[in-house]
Image (tube, rainbow, N blue to C red):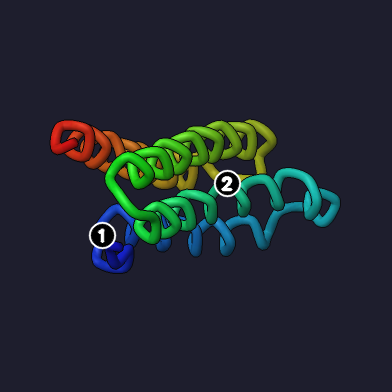
């Protein structure tokens, strides 16, 4: 069992989730069960799946949960694009958030490769 709190990728994903919560707080009220909810769930799914994978035994299971986290990061990437195109997110915030998502995805990819090489 690994301590997810020690992983830089988890830390970055956690802080991105916090930022997404703040950003979506200003979304239109009618989006509370729509895009707001979708973005928040995708954003929290990334660090949650990293944490869950760390609680599992073996590198194969950890890698599987990291892959799920990667999928959630990609989903969040689309939701950010949609939010920008609907003018719910500024261009500046969109660029910042997408940069963070891209960095997290690169870190996940690297970690998955290391795990697969060691097994």
The residue at the point 22 percent across, 33 percent down is: 116
Q: Which residue is nearer to you in this view: 27 or 3?
A: 3
- Residue ID for mark 2: 42
Q: Is residue 88 above or below residue 20?
A: above
Q: Is residue 3 left or right of residue 78?
A: left
Residue 35, picture quadrant: top right
Residue closest to the far left: 118
Mark 2 packing: few (<14 Cα in 10 Å), some, or many (20+)? many
Q: Is residue 32 above or below residue 18?
A: above
- Residue 9 percent across, percent down from the top left: 29, 53
Mark 1 packing: few (<14 Cα in 10 Å), some, or many (20+)? few
The nearer-to-camera label among 2 and 1 is 1
Q: Which residue is nearer to you in this view: 101 or 69?
A: 69
- Residue ID for mark 1: 7
- Residue 64 percent across, percent down from the top left: 40, 38
Q: Which residue is nearer to you in this view: 47 or 60?
A: 60
Q: Is residue 45 left or right of residue 99?
A: right
Q: Dot 1 lies on which element?
A: loop
């Amino acid at each position: 069992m690994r301590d997810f709190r020690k992983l830089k990728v988890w830390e970055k994903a956690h802080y991105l989730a916090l930022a997404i919560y703040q950003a979506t707080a200003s979304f239109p009220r009618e989006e509370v069960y729509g895009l707001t909810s979708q973005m928040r769930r995708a954003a929290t799914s990334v660090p949650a799946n990293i944490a869950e994978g760390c609680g599992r035994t073996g590198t194969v299971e950890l890698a599987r949960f990291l892959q799920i986290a990667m999928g959630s990061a990609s989903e969040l990437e689309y939701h950010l694009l949609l939010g920008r195109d609907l003018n719910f997110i500024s261009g500046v915030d969109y660029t910042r958030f997408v940069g963070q998502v891209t960095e997290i995805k690169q870190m996940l990819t690297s970690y998955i490769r290391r795990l697969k090489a060691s097994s």
